[in-house]
Structures are given as C-alpha cells and as structure tokens.
Amino acid sequence: MEARDQSRPTILVMAQFRRLRQGTCSLLRSLPDDAWDLRGTSRRAENVTVRGLAEHLALSDYRHLRALDETLDQVGAREGLAEIQKAHLDELLKLVPTSLHL
C-alpha cells in the first residue's frame, strides 16, 4: 500500500486524506453528547473513550500539519505563491471559532 501511495500524485493522496478526515469528523459531530464518554478497548491501550480517541486524532493531525508547515518553509515551497496561499498554520488556527489546547 505504501508503494502505491508513493506512486500517486501528492495532490491525490492529500485529497483522499481530506475526504477521510471529513468523514471521520462528520461521524464524530453526529454523536450524541453521552456517546463521548463510551469506553472501549483498542488494540494498543485499555479503557479508551471516544473523546480520548478524537483528542488523539486532533493532536496527531496538529503535529503533522505543524511538520508540513515547517517543511514548506524550509524547502521554499511558498515562494512565488499569492499571499493568501502562504498562510501558516498559526494564522489558519486563528480562524477556528474555538480554542485548541495542546
């Protein structure tokens, strides 16, 4: 599977990831309030909650986005782009209506 992903254009892989994450977020948004505290056992940990898994997912996404943001700066990938396309992660997070505590 990794070889297949490496042969695909980056924009395609990013689009697939975005669709997957949108689906996951949609499912999480549709949960009733009392479902967030439901407990279960994952393959790696004991007694995890839906909330815990969602928080882990958010933190993982933040770390990957931070690394991508830094890499874009290091390799100069933002050069020559319109100003609106040069927004850094910190600037984009200001658009989120609630706060993100990491």
Image: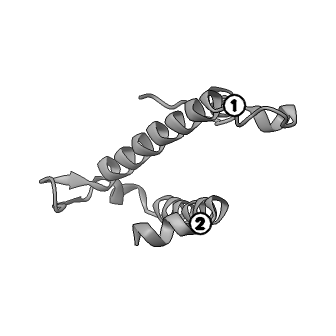
**Residue at left offset 34%, top offset 60%:** 35
Q: Which is more toward the observer, 70 or 7?
A: 7
Percent coordinates x, y for residue 101 in the rendering: 45, 28
Residue 56 appears at what percent x and percent y? 35, 45
Give the residue type at disc 2: Arg
Q: Nearer the viewer, residue 73 or 45?
A: 73
- Alpha carbon distance from label 1 to label 2: 27 Å
Q: Which colouring convention does the figure follow?
A: one colour
Q: Foreground: 7 or 63?
A: 7
**Quadrant of the snapshot with the C terminus:** top left
Task: Compare residues 94 and 86 and report the one nearer the observer.
Answer: 86
- Disc 2 on helix, strand or loop? helix
Horizontal arrangement in the rendering, residue 17 relative to residue 60 (left or right):
right
Q: Which residue is mark 2?
A: 19
Residue farthest to the left, as pictured: 46
Residue labelled with disc 1: 76
The numbered mark, 1 or 2, whose residue comes first in the sequence reads: 2
Of the numbered discs in the image, which one, if any, rests on residue 98?
none
User: Which element carries disc 1, helix, strand or loop?
Assistant: loop
Q: Nearer the viewer, mark 1 or mark 2?
A: 1
Quarter residue 8 falls in: bottom right
Crowding around mark 2 (Cα neighbors within 10 Å: few <14, some 14 to 19, many 20+) is few
Look at the image and tell me in which quarter the N terminus lies: bottom left
Residue at 52% over, 60% down: 21
